[in-house]
Image: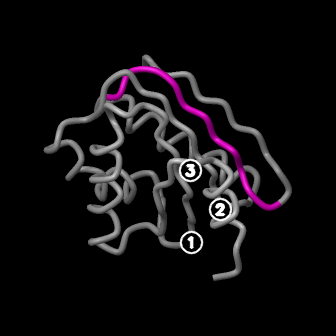
Amino acid sequence: MNIDVKVTPHGDYLHIEVRGIGNYENAVAFWQQVAHACEAHQCFKVLGEQYLLDSVTTLEAFDHPAIFKKVGITTKYKFAWVDKNPRTRETTQFVYDVLASRSISFGKMFNDINLAKEWLLSKS
């Protein structure tokens, strides 16, 4: 696994930072860690920041609904996500679009961490 994951609990959300190589195996390992952290803290709002040196392929992006199902991520989770690498943002957005189109997860992509946090903690 070529990723580094840092989980910081805040009372009403988890701040999860991930850095490293973006590929299918790392995606599975990462989302398992996210699900485990959320369960351990009984907190399902996630403010995510990523800086990956590469991204999954388009075909692997289509596998994310199966990954989420496998690790137990459902619509009870709310993700506000910031991809800090301009080269991987389009693919990350595509992954979220795939998940949303299959009603697997509730999330939104942002370019700014403060806007992401504001949206995550909003009542709507």
User: Secondary structure beneath disc 1?
Assistant: loop
Q: Which residue is mark 2?
A: 44
Q: Residue at x 56, y 65 (%)?
A: 77
Q: Which residue is mark 3?
A: 35
Per the image, is 19 magenta? Answer: yes
> Picture quarter containing residue 79?
bottom right
Q: Is residue 89 left or right of residue 101?
A: right
Q: Is residue 108 left or right of residue 121?
A: left
Instruction: State how far apart marks 3 and 2 are (Cα).
Output: 9 Å
Give the x, y percent position of residue 27. 38, 36
Depicted 56 relative to depicted 77: above or below: above
Mark 2 and mark 1 lie on one chain; the one further toward the N terminus is: 2
Residue 31 or residue 19, whichever sits in front: 19
Instruction: State how far apart marks 1 and 3 are (Cα).
Output: 11 Å
Give the x, y percent position of residue 47. 63, 51
Depicted 21 relative to depicted 11: above or below: above
Give the x, y percent position of residue 96. 35, 58
Q: Residue at x 26, y 35 (%)?
A: 56
**Overall secondary structure of the magenta stretch?**
strand
Q: Which residues are magenta?
A: 12-22
Instruction: State how far apart marks 2 and 1 are (Cα).
Output: 7 Å
Q: Residue furthest top?
A: 2
Q: Which label belongs to residue 117?
A: none
- For the residue marked with disc 3, what is the amino acid? Ala
Q: Residue at x 71, y 50 (%)?
A: 14
User: Secondary structure beneath disc 3?
Assistant: helix
Q: Which label belongs to residue 76?
A: 1
- For the residue marked with disc 2, what is the amino acid? Phe
